[in-house]
């Protein structure tokens, strides 16, 4: 951890999904820490197969969560002040927009959307493969944007998987927080 918890900007959840872009999560974590955030990583159950969980736990000083806890168990992560969903998959974007909270990751996204917390979502999957042409995807993006979620989806600018650089994502988060 590069930032002591007493002088940090707050807790930032990075929600990572099962994607070939998931290994880039580590870079987002490190840049967010350098910007003063106490970073916690949450992943979808399938996302655990794409991430180095032990490395992320060493970097953040927090366990990487992928499953709901039992009601009597204490929370091991601080409440989030902001969330970055990177990489977001087609599946997660659509389930989130529909309010299907069958995983911890999507449940947290649904909860924090309802709380009107700052959320940046970066869908990352191969363009031209059909998913990016499915009407549900664009309806879901439009719905999430209407709910106040900042969705960065510019595959023509960040081909071929919309792998937006961490600096761009964090600048967008700063802009979002400055406008609150």
Image: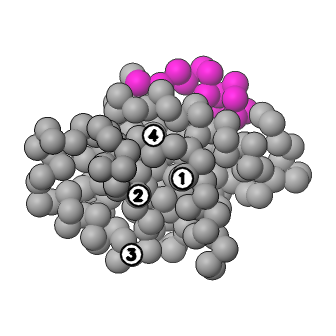
Q: Which residues are drawn in magenta?
A: 50-64
Q: Earlier in the sequence, mark 4 or mark 3?
A: 4
Q: Residue at x 51, y 43 (%)?
A: 165
Whether tag 2 and tag 1 are in contact, CB under 8 A, the answer is yes
Q: Which residue is mark 3?
A: 147
**Comparing labels 1 and 3, the label whose residue is closer to the camera:** 1
What is the distance, in whole Å, between disc 4 and disc 3 at their CAs? 21 Å
What is the distance, in whole Å, between disc 1 and disc 3 at their CAs? 19 Å
Q: Residues within 10 Å of mark 1 (few under 14, many from 20)?
A: many
Helix, strand or loop status at disc 4: strand
Helix, strand or loop status at disc 1: helix
Q: Is residue 74 visible?
A: no
Residue 145 shown in magenta: no
Q: Which residue is mark 2?
A: 152
Q: Which residue is mark 4?
A: 16
Seen from the viewer's position, the closer of residues 1 and 110 is: 1
Q: Does residue 138 appear left or right of residue 170 in this picture?
A: left
């Amino acid at each position: 951890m590069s930032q002591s918890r007493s002088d940090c900007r707050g807790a930032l959840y990075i929600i990572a999904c099962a994607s070939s872009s998931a290994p880039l999560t580590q870079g987002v974590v490190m840049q967010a820490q350098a910007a003063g955030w106490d970073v916690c990583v949450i992943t979808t159950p399938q996302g655990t197969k794409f991430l180095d969980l032990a490395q992320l736990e060493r970097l953040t000083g927090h366990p990487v969560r992928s499953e709901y806890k039992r009601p009597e168990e204490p929370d091991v992560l601080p409440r989030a002040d902001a969330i970055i969903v990177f990489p977001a998959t087609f599946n997660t974007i659509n389930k989130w927009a529909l309010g299907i909270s069958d995983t911890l990751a999507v449940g947290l996204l649904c909860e924090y959307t309802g709380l009107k917390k700052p959320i940046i979502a970066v869908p990352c999957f191969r363009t031209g493969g059909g998913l990016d042409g499915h009407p549900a995807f664009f309806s879901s993006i439009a719905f999430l944007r209407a709910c106040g979620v900042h969705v960065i989806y510019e595959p023509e600018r960040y081909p071929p998987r919309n792998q937006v650089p961490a600096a761009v994502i964090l600048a967008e988060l700063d802009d979002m927080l400055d406008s609150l």
